[in-house]
Amino acid sequence: MEADAKYAWVGGAIVGLVAALVFAVIWLKQVGTADRYHSYTIYFERIPLNGLSTGASVEMRGIKVGSVEDYAISSSNINRVKVTIRVDRRTPVSQTTVAMVDRNYVTSIARINLETPGEPGPPLVDVPPGEPFPVIPEGTSILGDVAGTLRGLGEQSAELMLALNESLNQQNRAALSATLTNAATLTAGMNALIARLDTTV
């Protein structure tokens, strides 16, 4: 009995030491990650997010400085997407920095670009009420605006063609065909008359 008790005590001590070691490793990893990275939130409403996924690159001036950690569509506004990013703490994210979305149109893989127009302002460190991290505002994408305009023109053209097709029923099409035939006949007659006049002259 005494030997069994000793073995149980030794086994319990070993299990306790292993658990403490695992806990210490996890804690040190989390502390190290928190020291190396800063997290930010971005709300996208105007820029399309096609091809953006968890783990996508976050870049500044063409250099990868972080990655996309999470994203979710707002339950109150389906056109608003909350994106959480993790950025290297040495990245100069300022109060004038804005977030854009760029994509490779061959692979359709998207990434987030952080742009700071002009002189950088103070560092972005303030956390708005109700937010877990500082919020980087959404920028304005010229290519996105152009794409949206072209998409709108395409939709309007499709609607116009559909309306025109519906207005030209079978009877109207027959009348239009007869008119075109008469115009062709009249043109042929005029050409023949001009030819005779030319011969007479």
Image: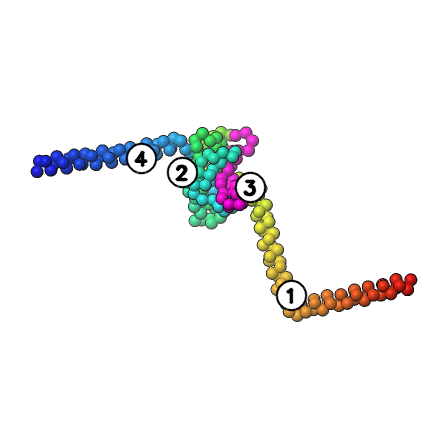
Question: Which callout, 2 or 4, points to the residue nearer the camera?
Answer: 4
Q: Are marks 4 and 3 in contact (CB under 8 Å)?
A: no
**Mark found first going from the N terminus, 1 or 3:** 3
Q: Which residue is mark 4?
A: 26
Residue 44 location in percent, x, y? Answer: 49, 43
Residue type, mark 2 in image = Pro
Residue 24: in sight, yes or no?
A: yes
Please give the residue where the numbered disc 1 appears in the rendered image: 168
Residue 167 placed where, x, y %? 63, 64
In the rendered structure, which disc, 1 or 2, sits on the residue that comes first in sequence? Answer: 2
Residue numbers of the magenta segment: 96-120
- Residue 154: horizontal and vertical position, in percent? 60, 53
For the residues bearing labels 1 and 2, Cβ distance under 8 angstroms: no
Q: Amino acid at mark 1?
A: Leu
Residue 159 drawn at (x, y percent): 60, 58
Find disc 3 in the rendering and name its residue. Answer: 141
Q: CA distance from mark 4 to mark 1?
A: 72 Å
- Crowd band around label 2 with a 10 angstrom C-alpha radius: few (<14), some (14–19), many (20+): few
